[in-house]
Amino acid sequence: MAGSGKTTFVQRLNSYLHTPGGKEPERQRRAPYLVNLDPAVSHTPYEANVDIRDTVDYNEVMRQYNLGPNGGILTALNLFTTKFDQVLGLMERRADEVDYIVLDTPGQIEIFTWSASGAIITDAVAASFPTIVAYIIDTPRTTAPATFMSNMLYACSILYKTRLPFLLVFNKTDVRDCGFAVEWMRDFEKFQEALASGGAQEEDSGIGGYGQGRGEPTYMNSLMNSMSLVLDEFYKHLTAVGVSSLTGAGMDDFFVAVSQARAEYMRDYLPELARLQTEKEKKETERREGEMQKVMADLKLDPEGKGMRWREEGELPEEEDEDEDEEEEEEEIDMSRRGDIMNRAKAAGGLKTGPTSKWARPG
């Protein structure tokens, strides 16, 4: 989510993995491999191993293509995706030297999650490494039921779009503890109480409602109530952790959740990816065989490919028919010439026919 502090969170991840100690001290000594995919960020508090800004100039893209901020980010990401196979090669070469590869993506959901370039990058990485999606939420901005529900809908759409192990990360817990949000996810009645007592909006705006004032029955309250019922089952399959990118609180719990999500990837998602890959290869093989059969039918080749066959016995191809007709015409012309010569010779008395016929001089 834009403005949730995900770039600062990546910096905290980098710092955490460089610092000995914690629950897995040996693994944390190895620095992560960092990839920045946000072309519009002005400054990154970490040193990225691969940075999209080194390849694509975001401001120049906006100027040349006459685009706005979001259009410039999307176009820059599309241009970068055309060379992402090279980035994937770099990541694969460093895979034995690092424990974690971290991708810092653009915060706009429509730019990465719902774009073709974002799907290509996600699928390519997921097919090569155990992949986990971490959705960073701005906890202080989620205190109102409406903004909380908006974040849950975003999370639901990302989960079903990527089909990968998913973590909800409530950031900025140093400002506001995430206990209320976790409670709303786990207890439907608590969310209903929050709606009834304070309304869907954090402030008394009356937007989209039948009445104004906190706690009054409004259209927004009714909508949030219905949507919470729909998402109640969705919450049961989500893992939520609270962290502070500023202080580093909760990072141990985050990496415990990452380890569990990695086991989930190996157990559930990897076999599914293998099945989808097998189906794709099977369809590609069937397509090629179908095209080959069409080519063979057009060329009238036998199944073994040993030679040509014709629709009927004795039927010759059109080219050979034309050659044979030309030869017959030439023979007819030659015979007519011979007939003219013989007739002239007989008229002159110089040609005798019969068993002992021979040429004789006339006169």
Image (spheres, rainbow, N blue to C red):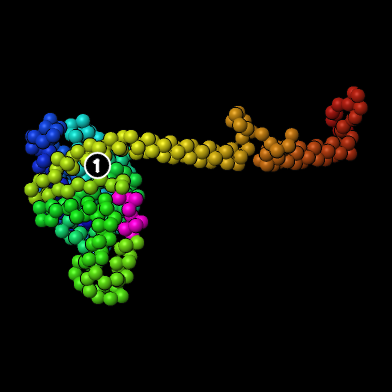
Residue 328: x and y in percent read 75, 39
In this view, the residue in front, 320 or 24, is 24
- Kindly state the secondary structure of the residue where label 1 is placed: helix
Residue beneath the point at 25% across and 57% down: 190
Taking the magenta stretch, the answer to whether it contains residue 234 is yes
Residue 87: x and y in percent read 24, 41
Residue beneath the point at 10% across and 36% down: 22
Dot 1 alpha-carbon crowd within 10 angstroms: few under 14, some 14 to 19, many 20 or more: some
Question: Magenta part mainly helix, strand or loop?
Answer: helix
Which quarter of the picture shows residue 88?
top left
In this view, the residue in front, 73 or 164, is 164
In the image, is 255 to the left or to the right of 153? left
Is residue 136 something one can see in this rendering? no
Residue stretch rendered in magenta on the structure: 227-235
Which quarter of the picture shows residue 349?
top right
Residue 355: x and y in percent read 91, 24
In this view, the residue in front, 344 or 231, is 231
Which quarter of the picture shows residue 91?
top left
In this view, the residue in front, 325 or 290, is 290
**Residue that mark 1 sits on:** 87
Residue beneath the point at 84% across and 30% down: 361
